[in-house]
Image (spheres, rainbow, N blue to C red):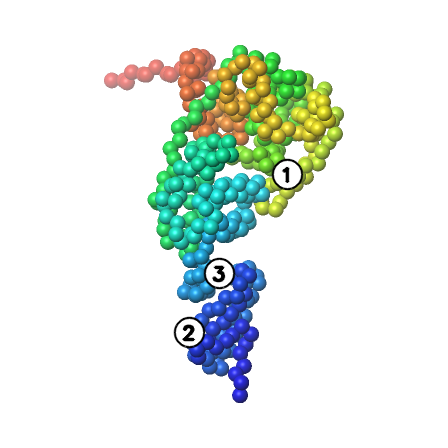
Amino acid sequence: MKKQYPTGVESHGGMLRIWFMYDGRRCREALGVADTPKNRKLAGELRQSVAYAIKTGTFDYEEKFPKGSSSKKERTSLTVLQLFNKWLDIKRYEISENTMIRYRNKVSSIVITLGQDMLVSSLRPKDLAVMRNELIDGFHLSGSGKRGRSVVTVNSYMSTALSVFSFAKENGYMDIDMKSSVKMLRKAKVKPDPLSLDEFDRLIAACPNEQTQNMWTLAFYTGLRHGELCSVAWEDIDMKERTLCVRRNITTAKIFTVPKTDAGTDRIIKLNDRAMQALKSQMVITRMNKQHSVTVHTRQRGKSREDACTFVFSPSVFCRNGMGGAWYSSESIRQSWNAASRKAGIRHRKAYQSRHTFACWMLSAGANPYFIASQMGHSSPQMLYQVYGDWMPGNNDEQIELINRKISQNVPHMPHRKNSQQ
């Protein structure tokens, strides 16, 4: 009588094994048990459970068959490209769409530099060190006209690569601990380089039109990040209460997201007189412009909201060829800064110095660091102490005078000590 085998169960040399489709290929795993009716039934049940786990996305090859032949084959044949794609596939459920875009960009450079077809099992710490050095030198970009990447960027790439290799080690794809063998590059502490009031006045005078003047005045007197500045809408501003609610940010990938802030999603900025003057000037230019509906991606993967926005600053206002968009990008902000800086004849700085200038001006004016931190979107003034510490001692004399006045006005007189009776 012919033996009956459940689906996916077969005999091999008198012993049972099962087969199933996984990752587009047929996998076979020997069970190490004799071909008997009872074992055939148990093997069929095992095969059904494997097929169900694959279908529901819960199948873990390493856990189910730690000594399996297909598992060993995957470990020895896995390439760098396949490993990083596996990691990205898992990571995409944990992070926002914008963060995923940044990871893909970093992974692309890492894989190209390491070699996408290089076997993970053959990787050694020196390969990661060579990758780090080539990213700094721009070796893999030869002929492209591009320079090597900065220390900050390379360390960011290294951090991502080490996360992937930790994932590989934890899941048995490699045996070496890369993290303990390869060091990050040391980076110099970058000090803020704020504009003086004279340089600021020259920069504003060099702006090509009133809107650009208003935009940079608001940037300097609020400390807005440039992605936040591009995203400001009239719907976010209360001119009566003199407040601006920071509700969104536009990324370098031109995606609207919630603001980058440690203190929460939205923050309220108190507008000073110079910021109010800039907005009043800008109202005449864009307040009656068309309202746009934009998609704002939240930090939760796959979640977004729709914001109705009449953008405060719009390139279309002064664009002569009709090609200007409804809102600025971070790249166009930088171009505007560079052009005005050159025309003003001031020393070149990165555009982000507008934010540093706001912090330094506020500290020099004696503002409370906790207030400054809340305006800039930090949960505490710790960042201010770390980055702008050199700007705080400049007011010591004024602070002492203030303390002396407060003490003389508010501190009660201490009673004279009474002589003890004999």
Q: Position of residue 300 (x, y in %)?
A: 58, 44
Location of residue 223 by image quarter:
top right
Who comes first in sequence, dot 2 or dot 3?
2
Asked if one can make out residue 343 in the rendered structure from this viewpoint, the answer is yes
Asked whether the beta carbons under mark 1 and mark 2 sit within 8 Å of each other, the answer is no
Task: Identify which residue is drawn at 67% across, 26% down.
Answer: 315
The label on residue 296 is: 1
State the residue in front, 107 or 359: 107
The amino acid type found where label 1 is placed reads Val
State the residue in front, 78 or 348: 78
The amino acid type found where label 3 is placed reads Asp
The amino acid type found where label 2 is placed reads Gly
Distance from disc 1 to disc 2, alpha carbons, whole Å, reads 55 Å
Residue at numbered disc 2: 32
Instruction: Give the label, 2 or 3, closer to the camera.
Output: 2
Rate crowding at label 1 as few (under 14), some (14 to 19) or many (20 or more) other CA atoms within 10 Å: some
Figure check: 145 above or below 359: below
